[in-house]
Image (cartoon, rainbow, N blue to C red):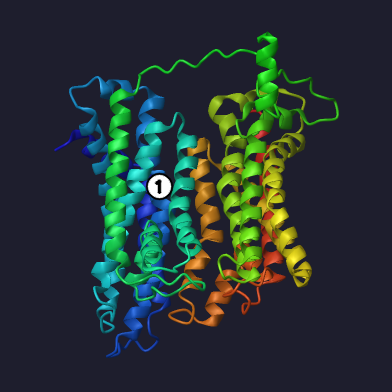
Amino acid sequence: MNPIVRRELLDWLRTRKAVAALALIGAAAAALVLARWPAAGVGDLNGAAALQVLRVFGYGTLACLILVLPAFPATSIVRERVKGTLALLLNSPMSPRAIYLGKLGGALGFVALLLAVTVPAAAACFPLGGSTVQGGVGLLYLALAMAGVQVTTLGLYVSGRSLSIDGALRATYSAVLAVCVLPLVAHWLIPPDSPELAELAAWLGCLSPVPAVLEAVGQGNVGIAGATYPTGAVLRYVIVAGVTGLALAFATVRRLSRAPLDRPRPPGTMTQDRSRGGRAARRLFFLVDPNRRAGGVSLWVNPVMVKEFRTRRLGRSYWMIRLVAVAAMLSLGLSCLAVAGALGWGLEVIGGALVLLQASLLVLFAPSLSAGLISAERERGGWNLLRLTPLSAGKILRGKLASAALPVLLLTLATLPGYVVLMTVKPELTGQIPDVVITLALTAVFAVLVGAAAGSVFRTTAAATAAAYISLAVVCVAPFLVWLGRDAPFGFTTVTAALRINPVAAALHAADTPGFTQYPLLPLNWWIIGTLCVLLWLFLEGRVRQLRRPD
């Protein structure tokens, strides 16, 4: 047996996070099944009750895998690099392929344990008459197992290319979200005018595990207009996930085989030290020069905010300009497609796509910007220096939050040109845009505060980043799984209660997106998110005051 498999699996199982993850998934699966258990406790002959239980169980288990699993393979290889033990592994008699197989085996063993704790909940379908879907529970577990393989290989690939644990977590969660969402968008964008295009759209859509799980629970036709997936999604997903997993494994092994043990950073050259031609070329290719010396800090500017901007990669102006430009081009591109009528969708669907674009940017970037504001200082010893300064706790907190809030605000504003195009085409949307903007602004504030609160609780940036992503996913992503089960198995009241805590769903409702207009979400969602933001601010202020006290 590969010794790394035993070491990895035992190391994970000895941590509190792994025990909590196993207990949480097992309890969540049981709670979801009990929530849809018939009141009389009697099964029916047609299997309708069992199918409802299977759908709730499938959606919940997929959500738990996406939320919990990426944190473990994402830190597997980069943790060895940070601790200095990767060099010992590469110099051992084991080959890079054996090292990778050991890491992969340990991660897949943990996936098997995560799925094993859900077996009692899945067995509840059989006392109710069994599932009417061909394949039933076995087909669902096949899709979930392949989702675990896909997430694990993706996490190991990112971990092998990362230099820090928190960076690996941010990149892995971003990649998992992209794999789950972007293939669906590609499927929607390809017009099925010919059999060849329809087949291409079907294979692209099956890069995501969502169509396979929907087919396994008998809801393959759920979605917006034009999003119906042809039969055989599970088989296509098994093939696609297997091929992509092998490709990622080959790339990771190759990376380990030629990875240098020492990576010296290039010393770089300041712009002022370059020749006149070099300076002219940089002014041509860079709107904002990354190597130009920064000016002094004004007395009217929060020094903590300036410090965060100058020491964080995404806080530098040239990176922010790139992100803002990409977001603006995406929003304008969707709007131009709607105006040209290339997709055959209504303006309401394009408005919903813009809302999802903004929400995805917020969920991706806000935790990565705010989770390390306090935890990184405590982890690297910089918090003791802040405690020695005459800065008050309120000024430190305001400077930290402002350094994360300003980039998020720029990303949010970058997608507004798309709304301007839609309002020009259809002036009736003018009354809806302010509600959408208010909802997304509250979402941005909430995302920043959640990340900062997680960073104040956890001492390490990796744990804070994972906690922030999981918390945001529970609020902004998990309710959509209930929405997918609308009418069967969830009723109108249950779906409304789940969506009211979701600011993304409230923004889709404000934009009159099909599938969300019938649920009364506003203004109650504003009150819920606003109250949570106030509570998070009070918690952060008290926590910073507590951390600033002398030992």
Query: Is residue 417 shown left or right of residue 113?
Result: right
Looking at the rendered image, the quarter that the C terminus falls into is top right
Going 66% across and 37% down the picture, which residue do you hit?
320
Q: Is residue 427 left or right of residue 90?
A: right
Residue under the image location 65 percent in, 33 percent down:
315
Mark 1 belongs to which amino acid?
Answer: Pro
The spot of residue 342 in percent (x, y) is: 57, 65
* Towards the viewer: 496 or 252: 252
Image coordinates of residue 544 in percent, x first then y, are 67, 38
Task: Give percent across and percent down for residue 46.
Answer: 29, 89
Q: Nearer the viewer, residue 541 or 255?
A: 255
Judge whether residue 368 can be spotted in this image: yes
Image: 266 above or below 169: above
Q: Quadrant of residue 350?
A: bottom right
The answer to whether residue 257 is left or right of residue 430 is: left
> What residue does disc 1 label?
70
Q: Which residue appears farthest toward the right when viewing the image?
A: 300
Residue beneath the point at 30% across and 87% down: 43
524 relative to 75, above or below: below
Quarter of the figure with the N terminus: top left
Residue 416: image quadrant is bottom right
Numbered label tally: 1
- Label 1: few (<14), some (14–19) or many (≥20) C-alpha neighbours in 10 Å: many
Q: Which residue occupies 28% across, 81% down? A: 132
Q: Secondary structure at mark 1?
A: helix
Q: Is residue 316 visible?
A: no
Snapshot quadrant of residue 127? bottom left
Say if 181 sits above or below 283 in the image. Answer: below
